[in-house]
Amino acid sequence: MLRRIAFLRNLWLRYRFRFAALAPAARRNLEAPARLRLTAPARSCSYVVVDIETTGFDPDSDRVVSIGALRVVEGRIRLGDTFHELVNPDRPIPASSIRIHGIIPAMVAGARPFGEVFDDFLHYLGPDVVVAHHAAFDLQFLNGAMKGKYGFELQNLVLDTVPMCREILFRPGLRYPFGIDLDSRQYSLDNVAKVLGIAISRRHSALGDSLATAMILQRVLARLEKGESGLLRDLARVARVP
Amino acid sequence: MANMKPDEFPFPQIGDFLRKVVPFDTLDDGELARIVSRIEIAYYPRGTVIVRQGSPSPDFLYIVHVGSVRITISGGGGEEILTDFRGEADAFGGASILQGSESLAEITATEDSILYLLPADVFRHLVNTNPAFERTFKFSLANYIKGACDSRYRQLSQPDGTRTINLDFFLAGKLVSDLMVRNLVTCGPDMTIRDAAEKMTRNQVSSIVVTDGRGTPLGVMTNRDLRSRVVAEGRSGDESVSGVMNRALHSVDRKTYAIDALLHMSEHHIRHLLVMDGDSAAGILSEHDFQVEVGSSPLGIIAQIEKAQTVDHLARLRKRIDNVLEMLLMQGVPVDKVVSLVTGINDRVTQRVLSLVEHAMADSGMGPAPVPYCWMALGSEGRREQTLLTDQDNSLSYADVPGEDGEQVRRWFLAFSEGVVDGLVLYGIPRCPGGIMASNPSWCQPEGKWRETFSKWVLRPDPLAVMLSMIFFDFRAVHGGTEFIAGLREELHGNLGKKKTILELSAREALENPPPIGFFREFIVERSGEHRNQLDLKRRGLRPVIEAARIRALDLGVDRTNTMERLEAVRDAGILDDGLYSDIREAYHFMNRLRIDRYLDAVAMNRDPDNFIDPATLNSLQRNMLKESFSAVARLQKKLLGGYLFP
C-alpha cells in the first residue's frame, strides 16, 4: 500500500515538475524510483549507507554538523566510494551534542553550509537505496534540505536497519547457545554491533557509524540470500521508511 | 568519488589492522591510505564458498580480518582434502592472481568472517613496485618464513607461556642431505619432452635432471617448465628436453646447512636446487621439501604418505604429522577440523600400509589377494573422530569363497591382517587392548559370516553383543567393499526395525554413565585412586554424547557414523530441537578441545597423556563452560535415551 502511494506521489511530482528548471541532481532524484528494481535480489542492489550528526534531535530547530556515507555494492562495502564532510550549522553547537560527536565550533567554522554540502551528497547518492540506523531521524534532516531547496522530498527508497535486525537477524524465539537472550535488547547501534561482534571505530563520527551500519546491512543481506525471500521487495516490506 | 580531504585518514582502524599484515607493514601512511581507499569489505557467513576450485583467476587478494577460512582441494574420488587454514591477518588468492591461473583450491569460510578485498590490479601493482610484496608473494616459501618470523609466531605463544614454537626448531642443524629427495631422476639431453614427462610421472617427481654421458648435470626441467615453456608456448612433445630445460642450474653441496640453502633459493627466486656430492648430482631440493619439513603443509604430508615405499618410511613421517597437527591446533584451528584431518591422514596411512603389505605378500610367494576384501574402520576411526591419542579398531571382510578354498583364503587374509596391524603399530597407532583388530581370527571373516554375526547380535542380544555393537556399529570402509558395507548397513537397520532390544539395553547402559555434574551444578570428581579429584573427560563427557547419538541414529535408520552428523540427522527428524543441538555441538567441541590441549601439554612435558582433567586447574570461564557442557550432555541423554527406559 505504502509502496503504491509513494509511487503515485512520485508520478505526480514528475508531472508537476516536468517543465521546471531543476538542478540536474534533483532531476535525477525524481527519476530514482523508476530505476529501482524491487524484484532484483537484495544482495545485488546498490545501497548508500548514511549517518548524520546534528546539534540536537529537533529537525525544525537543529542543524546538521556532519554527514558520512558509503556505498555497498553486491554486498561489499567500497571504502573508496565514500562521502564525508563536516557541515557549518551556522549556529552554536550545544555542549550536550559536542559530548556525543566531538565536533566543536572551531572545526566547522570553515565548513560549507548544509545546503551546499547536500547538493554534492545528492550527486553522490544517485538513484541508490538509502540505508540508515533509525533511518527516520536522518531522513528528517535530508528531507528538510531537499524540500527547502527543491520543493519535494528525497525520492529514493529509504530502509532502516533497526527493523531489519528485529525481523531478520534476531527473530524472536530464536535461541542462542548458552542462553544469550536477544528479545530484551534494545536495538541501539551499540547493542546490535556488540551482539554481532562488529567493532565500531570512532563511534559517533558520521563515517564510523555508517561503516558499522553497513556491516549490519551485510549480515542482513547474507541472511536474506540464504532464505527464500531474498528480493529487494522483501527487504523493503520489512524495513521501508516511512 | 571520495569526498575526503587528502590529509585525513578515512578509516584509521583498517589502516591499523593492515599494518599488522605482512607485508603491508612495510608501506608508509600515504601508500596505506591509497590502498585502504581501494579496499572492499565483504562478509561471509560460516560455510560460504568464497572461491570455487577451478574458477577463473580471482579479482581480489583476500585478507582475513575476522574469522577464518579453510582451503581444500577435491581429490579424484570426489572427497575433500583439507590443505590449510587461513586466520586473521592472513592473505590468500595472491598466487592465483600472479600466475593468472584458475583457482587450484576451494576456499570456504569456517566461521562467520569479515574479509578485506584488494582489487587484483592494485595488488599486481604492489608486487611489481614494492620489493617486500615481491618477496612475499612471488616466492611463497618466503611468505611462510617471513610471516612466521614476523608475526604469527609471536601470536602463537599461549597466554600461559608454556608452549612456544619457532622455525629454528624445525630446521636447526639440518643439512641439505636430510631434506633432499634422493630419488633423483635423470635423462639425457636428447630425450623427448614427452618421454621425460612420462618418466617424471612414473617416478612421482616434480623435476628431472638432464645429464650428459658422464653424469655431469647440464640442466633441470621442472613441472613448472612443462607448464610455462611447453604447454603455454605450444611446443611439441617430440622436441628434446635440452630445448626447454633450465640451464642456469643452481647447486649446493650436500653438506650445506638447510637454512642457507633456503636463503639462497629465496634470494634467487628459484624453486629447485641441485644437490651435489662432489661432481655428481645426489638429489634435488625443492621449496616443497622445506614446507614438508617445516610442516606447514598438510597437503605435503599426504603426498609424502602416498609416496612412502616402506612402512619404516611411514613411521618416520609420524613425527612430522604430529608437528603439523600441533601447529594447526596452536594456530587456533577448530578442533573438529583437526580431528577430521587426523582421520583423513590415518585413512591414507592405512591405505598405504594395506597396499605395501599386499605387495610384500605377493613378493614373498603367498600371491596377491585371492578375492576382493574390505578393510573396516570401527569405533572412533569408524566415526571419523580420531585424535592424536588413539588405538586401532579395525576388522576385515572378504568375498565369500565356497568349499575347501575357503580355508586357504582365510589363512591368506589372517596373515595379511597381521602384517597390516603390525605395520600400523610401527607407524604409531597402538594395538587395541580389547583385541578388536583384523588380526584377531574372530574379526577377519567372509562377508556372509559378518552378516550372520550382526544379525545375531540384534536378534538375540546378550551383554557381550551390547558391548561389541557399540564399537562395531560405527563401521565404515577404509578400503574396498563399498557395496558390502552398504548392504550390511541396510540389513542392520532392517533387523533393528524388527527388534530394538539391543538399543534398549545400550540406552540403559549409557544412562548408567551420566555426565559428572551434581544437582547443585558441582563437579563430581573421582573419589579415589590415581585420578582422585579429577574428571574423566572422555568417558564421562564425550562418550555419553557419542552413545546417545549412535542409539538414536540407529533407531532412525541413519546411515551416518559421525556423531555430529548423526545428531544433525536426529535433529532433522524432529527429535532434537535447534537449541539443544547447538548447545551440544559447542559442548562437544569444547570438551574435545580441552582434551586435546591436555594431550599437547602432556607431550610437551614428557608425561604420558591421558583423558583426565582436574577442575582446579581450569580458569573460571573454562569451569563454567565445562559445567554448561555437562549439563547440556545430561539434557541430551534425557531427551534421546529417556524413552528407552519405559518403552
Image (cartoon, coloured by chain):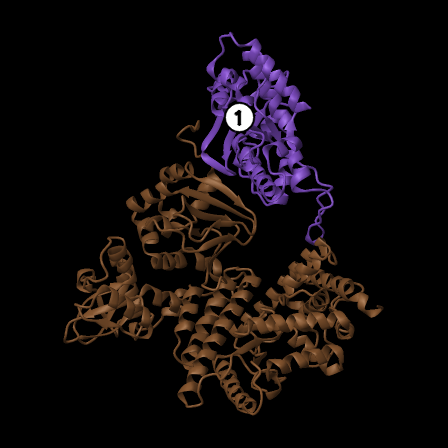
Chain colours: A purple, B brown
- The residue depicted at 67 percent of the width and 81 percent of the height is B452
From the viewer's perspective, tell me whether residue A240 is left or right of residue B519: left
The tally of labels here is: 1
From the viewer's perspective, tell me whether residue B268 is left or right of residue B491: left
- The quadrant holding residue A133 is top right
Amino acid type, callout 1? Ile
Q: For the view shown, which residue lies furthest in the right direction? A: B646
SS for dot 1? strand
With respect to residue B429, does A47 lie above or below? above
From the viewer's perspective, tell me whether residue B314 is left or right of residue B547: left
Residue B108 visible in the displayed image: yes
| Subunit that carries the residue with mark 1 | A
- The residue depicted at 43 percent of the width and 68 percent of the height is B302
Q: Position of residue B619 (x, y in %)?
A: 64, 62
With respect to residue B498, does A225 lie above or below? above
With respect to residue B462, does B116 lie above or below? above
Q: Position of residue B407 (x, y in %)?
A: 56, 91
Q: Nearer the viewer, residue B534 or B39?
A: B39
Q: Position of residue B500 (x, y in %)?
A: 77, 72
Q: Which residue is mark 1?
A: A67
From the viewer's perspective, tell me whether residue B600 is left or right of residue A169: left
Quadrant (top left/top right/bottom left/bottom right) for the C terminus of chain B: bottom right
Quadrant (top left/top right/bottom left/bottom right) for the N terminus of chain B: top left
Residue B625 visible in the displayed image: no
- The residue depicted at 48 percent of the width and 60 percent of the height is B156
- The quadrant holding residue A195 is top right
Q: Position of residue B637 (x, y in %)?
A: 75, 65
- The quadrant holding residue A242 is top right
Q: Nearer the viewer, residue B30 or B564?
A: B564
Label 1: few (<14), some or many (≥20) within 10 Å?
Answer: many
- The residue depicted at 49 percent of the width and 22 percent of the height is A121
